[in-house]
Amino acid sequence: MFKNWFRRDSSEKYKMGCGSSFDASDGPRTVVIFGSTGLLGGAIARRLLQEPFLYKVRCVTRRSSSEKARQLAEHGAVIVNADLGETKSLEKALEGADIMFLTTHYWDERNKEKEVIKGLNAIDAAIQCGVKHIIFNGSENVKKIIGKECNHLDSKSAIEEYIREVVQLVGINFTILRLPFWLENFYSVFKPHKLKHAVYAVALPLEGCELDMMSVEDVGEVIASILRRPRQYYGKTLNLSAEALSMENIVDTFNRHFDNRKFTDPKIRVKDMEKFQFPGAKDLAAMFEFYQSGEAVRDIKLTRKLNPHAMTFDRWLSENRDKVEEALREAN
């Protein structure tokens, strides 16, 4: 049950006030994508833009003048300025839309309550505008599973709960995605850190467990597959993963691709990460404890059905070596 600070009245009768009466048989479906200048939303937008006869892609951003927004516009996207904290702007962005892909962001402000409220704002606006299908980047309730707060995942779980209670009540279709560890983390927040000249540590607290992983770029094809046969996925939770690897597998793969460097496993533990001083360390430690719990169930077979070409870590590293190389130089 929701806490009072974000509880909405699920008994309210929503009025479909944004004029969405579009039928898929009339032509391309309008897909509104939040987070379209980020990794996840951008991957989905780029994939759907490849099929202009099927989709009209509307990309929501707070920075319509950014280079990423400009590139999406050049490929046919309609760029819309909107803010998840401003309801009127959301209703304008969603007017006439058939499908909404929503992802929310904890790390911008590191505030769980704000992320939840913004997510609920988008859901309410979609309901008001008569959006027919909501796809949400969700999560399990980590605190309920392991007894420790994991704000960036628990916030998404709360939005999921709202979708299940309210969206289902008013008769709108929804699909929930649950993603694994992003391979793109290896050139960002979890890039290997330098120990000494040409020696790097891959610091993931797996403690003997395997880690489900996937490239964010491959989620675009997953969404395209869902939208080709949406009825199969209405009301479903799709637990995605391209493969599951141990630390030994991960380190060996790094070493195969970078013969001028040595990568090692420092055998970091969850309790070690909890003591780190960077912002969000406890949330990330809880995330890995959740991964170790056995409750983060992901479905490789389903993922490969939705995207038969989803990249392994080995292939991803081959295709993204330059980005990882740049991240390693920054670690010097």
Image (cartoon, helix red, strand yellow):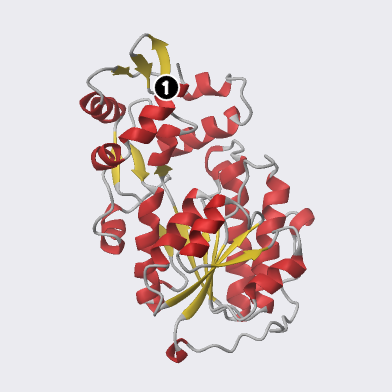
x, y (%) of residue 208?
33, 27
The residue singled out by tag 1 in the image is 329
- Hey, which quadrant is residue 124 in on the image? bottom right
Position of 97 with respect to 307 (left or right) is: right
Residue closest to the far right: 5
Please give the name of the residue rendered at 75% of the width and 77% of the height, measured from the top-left corner: 12
| Quadrant of the drawing holding the C terminus | top left
Q: Is residue 221 visible?
A: yes
Please give the name of the residue rendered at 39% of the width and 80% of the height, measured from the top-left corner: 53
Position of 61 with respect to 184 (left or right) is: right
Q: Vertically, is 196 above or below 150?
A: above
Element under disc 1 = helix
x, y (%) of residue 321?
31, 34
Density class for disc 1 (Cα within 10 Å; few <14, some 14-19, many ≥20) is few
Q: Vertically, is 203 above or below 180?
A: above
| Quadrant of the drawing holding the N terminus | bottom right
- Hey, which quadrant is residue 100 in on the image? bottom right
Q: Vertically, is 247 above or below 35?
A: above
**6 or 146: which is nearer to us?**
6
Q: Vertically, is 263 above or below 18?
A: above
Please give the name of the residue rendered at 46% of the width and 20% of the height, measured from the top-left corner: 331
Q: Is residue 36 visible?
A: no
